[in-house]
Amino acid sequence: MPGDKATSYHALLLAALAVGESQIMGLPEHGDVLRMASTLRALGAEVIAEAPGTWRVAGRGIGGLREPESVLDIGGSGTAARLICGTLASHDLFATMTGNANLRRQPMRWMTDMLQDCGARFHCPTDAWLPLAVQGARNAVPIERRLSMQTAPAKSALLLAGLNAPGWTHVTETAPTCDRAAGLLRHFGASVMVEPCGDGYTTGVMGQPELRGTNLALPGDSSLAALLLLAALIVPGSTVTIRGVAMDSQRAELFTILQKMGAHLEITRKRLEGGAPVTDITATYTGLHGADMPAVLAGSMAIGDPILAIAAACATGPTRLEGRAAPPDGSLLSATLAMLRLNGVRVEDASESIVVHGTGAGPVGGVRVEAGTAPRVALCGLVLSLASATPARVDAAGIEQDCPGILALLRQIGAPLA
């Protein structure tokens, strides 16, 4: 698989904050990752492509970033924007950030409100997040935060803000999210703690460490892998094996839910690479069945995840997701449910739960799915069409930017794309 995109953002940022040089291998070289590299250059780091997928970063050390001379264009990645924002919050510099039209529409003031705890000041001209101006804290203070919404990028942003503040920064979650940041922080030499706290977990990082440049091979993109595995689970007679997949806690939760629905998933060769858990996964079609997902298992990740929605649409019987909470990106959930209904899937969207009624076979299909503001949903619509009675027409605009190489990978496993 191509390198994991979210891990790429974390790795580039930490390498820019380290002392010495880092070599990152397996970097996916596409729009938003390249914009992250450009942003870090504007902040003073040396970021150079040495060979296809292999990059060298000469870092500036914690607190050593310089003030950019122009506006930072983050592109379309909400994860990258959060990580940059968290990093800038504890650096004594002024910067302005913007992104593409989709990113500028996201209501993200809740994120900047939390980052102000370290002493930073933000100015957003509207209720949306971008564009924004940030004046980083002159003398940053550690952050103590309990997250009300489970979102791994928010946790990472708070931990990154804590890197340039003396003492421990602690972020508490009511349910575990991806622990990518903790593993990579340890890999670069930071002191990190993760421990139970009531019903959740607290992650802490000791501020003002001297991060050390290191070599890092990125694990395979788990989001792309999940799409290919999903194709195998909904198309009769299929078996797909993916090697070297990043297995963070959030994806592990998704696979647990799929197994609860009867998915035949063989997870082997669990190992650590670059501080991140990696595994090989084989998916074999056996037919899925609907299931009730309590809030403790589903959570906002499952409710808003198009992959789970596609599985439920092809399962036998209803899949009920209890404890409905509004995920940070509500537009993704709305677009997912609209796409299912467009394909003839019956969906009940109540205040406390969502019910997807599967028939044990693919939906009618035969519709046109627009990429619109959610190319990931359009891509899931494309995968759903592999099991539909009638092929769907999917607007490919933005799909390759969101998931570079996915169309070639789908063709590689036999998807009849035209």
Image (cartoon, rainbow, N blue to C red):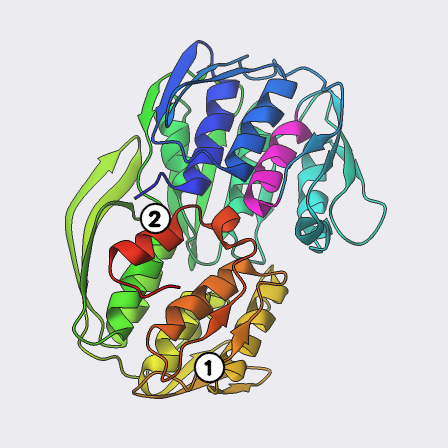
Could you say where residue 31 lies in the image, as x and y percent from the top left? 54, 38
Element type at marker 1? loop
* Relative to 347, residue 334 above or below: above
Q: Position of residue 371 (x, y in %)?
A: 57, 63
Q: Position of residue 344 (x, y in %)?
A: 48, 87
Q: Report helix, strand or loop for mark 2.
A: loop
Q: Which residues are magenta?
A: 76-90
Which residue of the protein is positioned furthest toward the right in this rendering?
A: 125
Q: Earlier in the sequence, mark 2 or mark 1?
A: 2
Residue at the farthest top position = 20
Q: Quadrant of the C terminus?
A: bottom left
Q: Nearer the viewer, residue 196 or 290?
A: 290
Name the side, left or right, on which 259 lies relative to 65. Answer: left
Compare residues 78 and 108 and report the one nearer the observer: 78
Q: Which mark is residue 248?
A: 2
Q: Nearer the viewer, mark 2 or mark 1?
A: 1
Amino acid carrying mark 1 in the image = Gly
* Residue closer to the observer: 126 or 211: 126
Point out residue 345 in the picture as x, y percentages from the top left corner.
Answer: 46, 86
Q: Which residue is mark 1?
A: 366
Separation (CA) of disc 2 from disc 1: 35 Å
Q: Looking at the magenta stretch, what is its main secondary structure?
A: helix
Question: In the rendered image, which quarter contains the N terminus?
Answer: top left
- Which of the pair 97/230 is nearer the observer? 230
